[in-house]
Image (cartoon, rainbow, N blue to C red):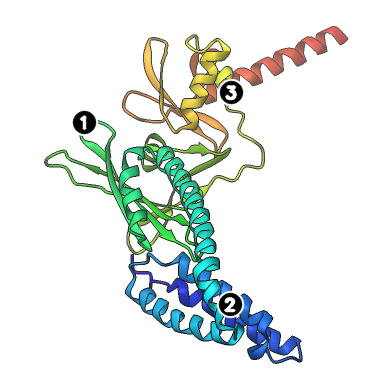
Amino acid sequence: MDKKKVNRIEVEVAKWKEEESRFKTLFSFDVSTNKGLLRKKLRDFEDIAAKYRKTNDPAERLSLMALKQERRHLERVAYTNTFIRLFRRLIILPIRRQILIVRQNRMKEMNEQKLTQILSKLGLKSHNPAVRKHIDNDETTFSIPAQQYVNGTEKLNSRVSFEKDVSGEYKLSSHEIGLGTDAKGQENHNKILQLSADLLPNSKESYNLLQGRSVQIDGKWIKLDLNDQDPNGKYKIKEIQQLDSFALVQSIEQLGLKQFRTVHQIEHVAGLLRQGERVPVVINRRRYELEANPQFKTIDVYDECNLKLVKSVRNGKVQNTEQARVTKVDKLNERSNKVRLSKN
């Protein structure tokens, strides 16, 4: 990652500098000699030192040395009594540090649980030990590469990157997924998805997105945007805007297919279509595949040659759309003729 590392100690100390500048404009007393503020500043600096005591970053370790000198100066000014300073160092500080360590460990555990949930959703639960190792090393940023075979030759190449924020919590910073092949003599068309931290498709959904199909995640239909590619060849995801909701279950029922008659069967098919799957069906003893098309609120039908049919499926039969239109017109004409005869 080409991001510049942030010195977290400098960031937190700078916050205090901003507070001091703000106090100077608000109040008439001398901020630099007010013992109440100096003691609060000292406690905060002691917490910062305890919080980042295990950092391995050279710049942060240098900042800790400078912070130690600043703490000693603040201590002498805020607590002029030698006995009180000694009492703080031997009794107060160890207790406060222990409380902070317990709080940090609890936050770290909650953070690891959150990252475990993210990896599980992505189908990368087996990489939990690697993530934990990076966290234990207190790394500011790290990435986890992974491969998952989806069939005999095709595989998903993913890279999940994490970054520690100023509060010390690790968060998902980027998620890239590419589709490659091991087949000899074939080009490796490696499309890459650039996903946001709040979009977490599993391996099956990622594969279907890379195949150009629509997928529903958290109630939103998304699709690979072939018109939005950055210089590194990464594609972004677009959300399919719908004025009306896509009635997927009703669309399946309208097909009238014998294979999908019960509520359970229809819901199962709807679940597969929401994941971007193509569902095989048999119509008139021929094999077809169904695919959700939320952009046009339809279910597309593909034949054995992977060609989309310019036809409609109604009552379990494939019918030319032109024939369907003519049939509807004939029925309307027939009905109007009956009305005319009844009037005569």
Q: Quadrant of residue 42?
A: bottom right
What residue is at 36 percent from the left and 17 percent from the top? 287
Disc 2 versus disc 1: distance between alpha carbons?
A: 72 Å
> Disc 1 designates what residue?
152
What crowding class fits label 3: few (fewer than 14 Cα within 10 Å), some (14-19), or many (20 or more)? Answer: some
- Residue 325, can we see it? no
What residue is at 31 percent from the left and 51 percent from the top? 133
Give 324 or 177, whichever is nearer the viewer: 177
Location of the N terminus (image quadrant): bottom left
Location of the C terminus (image quadrant): top right
Residue 75 image position (x, y, % from top left): 55, 82
What residue is at 44 percent from the left and 38 percent from the top? 121
Residue 222 image position (x, y, % from top left): 50, 43
> Disc 3 designates what residue?
249
> Disc 2 designates what residue?
84
Q: Quadrant of residue 30?
A: bottom right
Dot 2 or dot 3: first in sequence order is: 2
Identify which amino acid the numbered label 1 is placed on. Gly
Identify which amino acid the numbered label 3 is placed on. Val
**Residue 175 in the image: above or below residue 49:** above
* Farthest residue, direction right: 343
**SS category of the residue bearing label 2:** helix
Q: How many marks?
A: 3
What crowding class fits label 1: few (fewer than 14 Cα within 10 Å), some (14-19), or many (20 or more)? Answer: few
- Residue 34, can we see it? yes
Dot 2 or dot 1: first in sequence order is: 2
Q: Which mark is residue 15?
A: none
Q: Is 15 left, or right, of 53 in this rendering?
A: right
**Residue 28 in the image: above or below residue 46:** below
Give 74 or 1, whichever is nearer the viewer: 74
- Kindly report which numbered mark, 2 or 3, lies closer to the viewer in this rendering: 2
Q: Is 193 left, or right, of 83 in this rendering?
A: left
